[in-house]
Amino acid sequence: MRLGIALLTLLAAATDPLVSQTIEGVWKPVRVVIDSGANAGRHTTDVQPGLLVLTKRHYSMMFVQGFKPRAVPSDSATDQELGLSFLPFTANAGTYQRTDSTITFTASVAKHPAVMAGSSFTRQVRLKGDTLWFTGPGFKAIWMRIER
């Protein structure tokens, strides 16, 4: 009897997509769809670099926003020029919680002080294998797992 219950439990866990799929790993962006504005449309070849690292409870994310590479500042760049090179760069880390279709990030350290002082942010999420879909205000993004 115990063996039968154990087998049924294993079978249920193997077929339940929320149990059998883990969000943990290292992810990179591969496609972004913007709903409106100057960058409206589907972007694949011009998606800028990024990494999202998810452990059981913690995350770290760094990525370049937009669809143009950042200019490399010269050795004699002004403070203003250096500052402009960091505007499209996002970097923060902290904890996250995932429910069936959402993920809520709470930063404990961030490039921008307002992100650390601000509240959590939530995104709609869908996971299938090594593909992770994020949906937020005005955008949809697809990230691919590059390491488990």
Image (tube, rainbow, N blue to C red):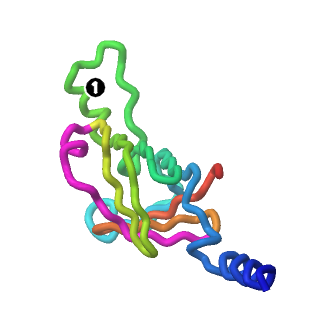
Which corner quadrant of the image does residue 80 belong to? top left
Q: Which residue is mark 1?
A: 82
Is residue 18 shown above or below 88?
A: below
SS assignment at label 1? helix
Residue at the spot 35% in from the left edge and 66% down from the top edge = 123
Using the image as rendered, state which of residue 11 and residue 42 is in the foreground.
11
The correct choice, above or below, for 73 with respect to 30 in the image is above
Q: What's drawn in magenta, residue-wise?
A: 112-128
Q: Quadrant of residue 116?
A: top left
Magenta span has 73? Answer: no
As for residue 113 lying within the magenta part, the answer is yes
Q: Is residue 114 above or below residue 13?
A: above
Tell whether 2 sits left or right of 41: right
The residue closer to the viewer here, 23 or 131, is 23
State which quarter of the image contains the N terminus: bottom right
Image coordinates of residue 58 in percent, x first then y, are 45, 48
Residue 136 position within the rendered picture, expressed as x and y whole percent measured from the top left: 33, 67
- Quadrant of res 93: top left
> Residue at the location (35% across, 42% down)?
92
From the top left corner, tell me how far across and down residue 105 is, in percent. 35, 55
Q: Position of residue 76 (x, y in %)?
A: 30, 13
Numbered marks: total: 1
Answer yes or no: is residue 64 visible: yes
Q: Give the residue type at disc 1.
A: Leu
- Specify whether 103 is left or right of 133: left
